[in-house]
Image (tube, rainbow, N blue to C red):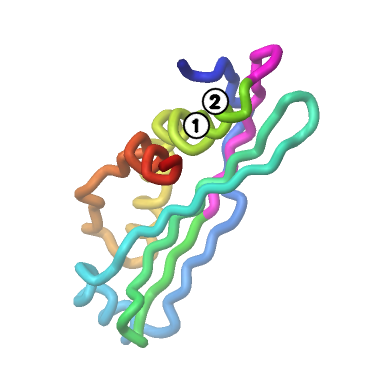
Amino acid sequence: MTVKHKIILGYIKDLSVETPDPESLISAKENISKYSLKLDLSSKILKNKMIEVYTKLSYEDKINKKKTYVEMTYATVVKIEEEKPIAEEIKKFILCDLQIQIHPQIEKIFVQILKLSGFPDLKFNSKIDFNKLYNEKKN
C-alpha cells in the first residue's frame, strides 16, 4: 500500500559539472563506458507533515585522472496526507514508491544536463529497480 501524498514541488537543489579542460572531455567521451551512475537518497522532515526528499545522481569515472564529473541533487517536497502514517511505510514510500514516480523526470533532466555538458549522444541503458534496492536495504 502506498502512502497518500501530494507532491508540492520539485527543483534542482544543487548542480555541479566539472570539466577541467578539453583533454578531460575528450578522454571522458573515449572512456564513457567506464563511467557509472551513482544514486544517493536522503530526506529531511519539514513542518506540516511535509518531507523534502533529496535524490542525488552522480556520473563519474573512478579510474581515469582526466575526467568530467557531473552531480545533481534534485529535491522533491511532499505533503503526507495520511492522519497517522506508519514509519516503515513512510520509509518505503521515500526510498521506493516516490522514486518510481519521480525518477523518469529526474533522469530526463540529468541526461539533458549531460548532453549540454558535452555528451550529446549519451543514453542510460539500464533502469533502476527501486523495489529491489529497497528490499536489499531492508534485509
**Quadrant in the rendering for residue 10:** top right
Residue nearest the observer in this picture, 28 or 94: 94
Residue nearest the observer in this picture, 132 or 114: 132
Q: Secondary structure at mark 2?
A: helix
Which amino acid type corresponds to the residue marked 2 in the rendered image?
Answer: Glu
Residue 137 drawn above or below residue 9: below
Q: Which residue is at 62% across, 43% downward?
A: 43
Q: Which residue is at 26% across, 80% downward?
A: 26
In the rendered structure, does residue 74 fall within the stretch colored magenta? yes
Q: Are marks 2 and 1 in contact (CB under 8 Å)?
A: yes
Question: Which residue position is annotated with label 1?
Answer: 92
Q: Which residues are magenta?
A: 73-85
Residue 66 drawn above or below residue 91: below
In the rendered structure, does residue 6 fall within the stretch colored magenta? no
Q: Which residue is at 41% across, 42% downward?
A: 139
Q: Secondary structure at mark 1?
A: helix
Question: Which residue position is annotated with label 2?
Answer: 89
Residue nearest the observer in this picture, 112 or 93: 93
| Dot 2 crowding, Cα within 10 Å, few <14, some 14–19, many 20+ | few
| Dot 1 crowding, Cα within 10 Å, few <14, some 14–19, many 20+ | many
Prevailing SS of the magenta stretch: strand
Which amino acid type corresponds to the residue marked 1 in the rendered image?
Answer: Lys
Q: CA distance from mark 2 to mark 1?
A: 5 Å
**Residue 114, x across and y down, in percent:** 36, 59
Q: Is residue 109 left or right of residue 49?
A: left
**Residue 25, x across and y down, in percent:** 32, 77
Which mark, by number, is residue 59?
A: none
**Residue 105, x across and y down, in percent:** 41, 37
